[in-house]
Structures are given as structure tokens and as C-alpha cells.
Amino acid sequence: MSVGRWSHSATLLDDGRVLIVGGKERPYGSVPSTEIFDPTNNSWSSAGNTLKPRGEGHTAILLNNGQVLVTGGTEDGSSELYDPDENKWLYADNMMESRKWASATLLPDGRVIIVGGDDASRSGSKELDSAEIYNPSTNKWSLANNMNHAHSGHSATMINNKLLIIGKDSAELFDPLTGVWSLTGNPVRARSTGSTATTMANGKVLVTGGEWVHGGFLQGDKGGGLYTAGSVGTGTGNDGGKHPRIHMPIIIPIEDVEFYDLENGTWQSTSKMSEARRHHKAILTSEDRVVVIGSSQVETFSLSTQTWSPLGNLIRNHGESYTATFLANNKILITGGRVETENGYRGLSTTEIFEIN
């Protein structure tokens, strides 16, 4: 790509090209530029700048008319459309609420539902229980009923014309015909964020990985400036309170995998992945096969045997917050990601194509 990116979006267009939008190159600021990858000649071209820079936490989704709706990642609730025929960005109606880390899902009737996320207009991270629906024919947003719980960084997938949302320790279904949210019962494994949800040919949803986040602290040490990890708790450091404990989240990646069965309304564990993964990608490549792309390792799940098998390694380690897009001829395009440097995270401009055997 022309610039390093993480937390960007990748959308497969109707003609087989891939639109890359926004993200971050450095810890602060958003990347305003967009670009398109053409797999027929393995080339990149500019798609111009978005009308508003779209940083981490935005969504991008292909509409039935071939345009791409981009929402969130800004403080003003703005949304916009990309027209691939004209290679132009167009204003869309503003969302009802400013959001980041929401989910965007195409409904059977062609509308788009945006669910949850963090309130992007706040300096904090208030999670939202609201949802809203975009109608491409009118270019307008309307509020949907609120969820039973607030969700952010959740996974979402359509199953039997209903929307399944999988959040921290709960999940719920949205019925577009009635507008009603209903709880499904709790998943086997609690997942704070970073999991994937894939609807299989048998009508079940495969949920993989993610992370569990709980409170923790760094323990102050003598001499100042040095800290060691501590267990959950409060109080002062081991230097008599001179350097108190610093509270911070403890993040635990998850290797667990489970199914949701809509017909029975049940959750059931299945074979674990070979390693714990968070903010990874899962792609349905055939009726009974899901390919999971980690930071460097690729493996596949077989529905018929419910087992995992290695497929190989990527050329380079993409860290996290990369994209993976299923192309024609059993190829997957991986773009960007981030690595940690002395000056903080840096976005990667690296792209590669992984071919599934």
C-alpha cells in the first residue's frame, strides 16, 4: 500500500477489486487516504481521500447498489458513500449517534444496521446499547430498538435472516421483521472483544478466539519509574506508597471455539485452535470450511470433522488490526497491521496474498 495502516477496513467490490479505507499509521491521527487493489494485475491505485478521516473503529460495508457505506471513527457521527463507478466520495446522512467499534451488517432487504460501539463523542469509552438503520433508497438513518445490553468491539453475523450479536458475556438476536431483540443465553466462554463469528452451511455460527479483559495493576518499585505486573487489587506499591500501583487492564487471548445453534438456542464448545488469537480474521471459504488468519499463522476448521489443520505461515507477521479479504480462486489478500517500536505502534504498508491449497 502507499502508506502504513492498522485498524483500516477492506471491502470487496462487485468487480473483484478491494477498497482500503482509513485507519492509523501512528498512535495519533487518522489516515485520510483510500486506495484500491486490483487482483487482476496486482496493482494499487488511489481512491482519493474520505470526506472525514476515518480512524480506528470505523465500519465499511458494500451496499446492494455497489456503493460502499462508511460510518464511524469520527466524533461527529458522520457517514459517507464511495461510488466505485465514479471513483468519488459522497456525503451520506449523519448517524443518530457518534460511534466507534460498532458493527455494520447488511440486512436481507438491503438496509444496513449499525449496532452498539463506543460513544465517539466522549473522551471516555461509554459503551452503547443503541442501534440504528440506514436506508440507501432514502439516504436516511432511523433508530432501531435498543439492545438488552451495551456491546462494543463485538462480533456480528446474519443467521436465518436474523442478526446475532456476541458481546462480552452475552449474546442476542435482532429480528428485522419485528424490530425485537431477544437474548440467546450466555456463550460458553466470555469474550470481551476481538472474536469472530461465521455462519456455517448447517446454519450454526462458529465463534473463535477473542480476548478477555479484566482489571489489574502495575506494582510500583523502588527507585521510581520501574513497575512489575501485579495481581488484581488496590493499594500502594512495595516502596511504602512512594510509587503507588497503577491500574491497567490485563488482557488474556483466547483459543476457545464454540457453536451457536439457532434451532435449539444452545451454545456448545468444539475443538480449540492451535493457539490463542485475538483481533484475527475468519473467512468461510466453502460450505464446511473456515480459514482463520492469525498474525502469521493460518489454519482451517472442518465442519464435518470439527478439527483444526495448519495451512502454513504468512510471509511476515502482521501483528494485529490487519485485514483479510477472500478473493477469487481461493486467494486471501492480507493488508497492513501494526508493529510496536520504541516510539509506539507503527502501521505496516505490507500486503500479501495467501493461496489456499
Image: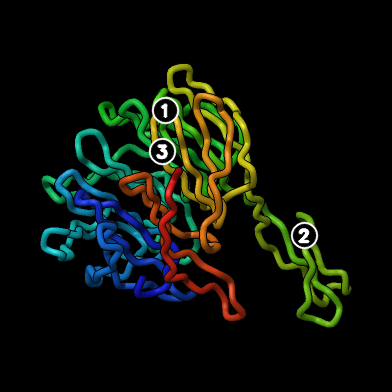
Q: Residue furthest front?
A: 357
Residue 191 image offset from top left, x and y in percent = 58, 43
Q: CA distance from mark 3 to mark 1?
A: 26 Å
Q: CA distance from mark 3 to mark 2?
A: 45 Å
What's the residue at 32%, 63% (across, down)?
21
What's the residue at 19%, 56% (across, down)?
93
Characterize the local packing of mark 1: few (<14), some (14-19) or many (20 or more) Cα atoms within 10 angstroms: few
What residue type is disc 3 on? Leu
Name the image quarter holding residue 350: bottom left
Q: Are marks 3 and 2 in contact (CB under 8 Å)?
A: no
What residue type is disc 2 on? Thr
Name the image quarter holding residue 46: bottom left
Disc on res. 234: 2
Q: CA distance from mark 2 to mark 1?
A: 38 Å
Question: With 280 as the anchor, is 11 left or right in this view?
Answer: left
Q: Which of label 3 and label 2 is nearer to you?
A: 3
Disc on res. 114: none
The residue at which mark 1 appears reads as 182
Disc on res. 284: 3
What's the residue at 34%, 29% (across, down)?
162
- Secondary element at image label 2: loop
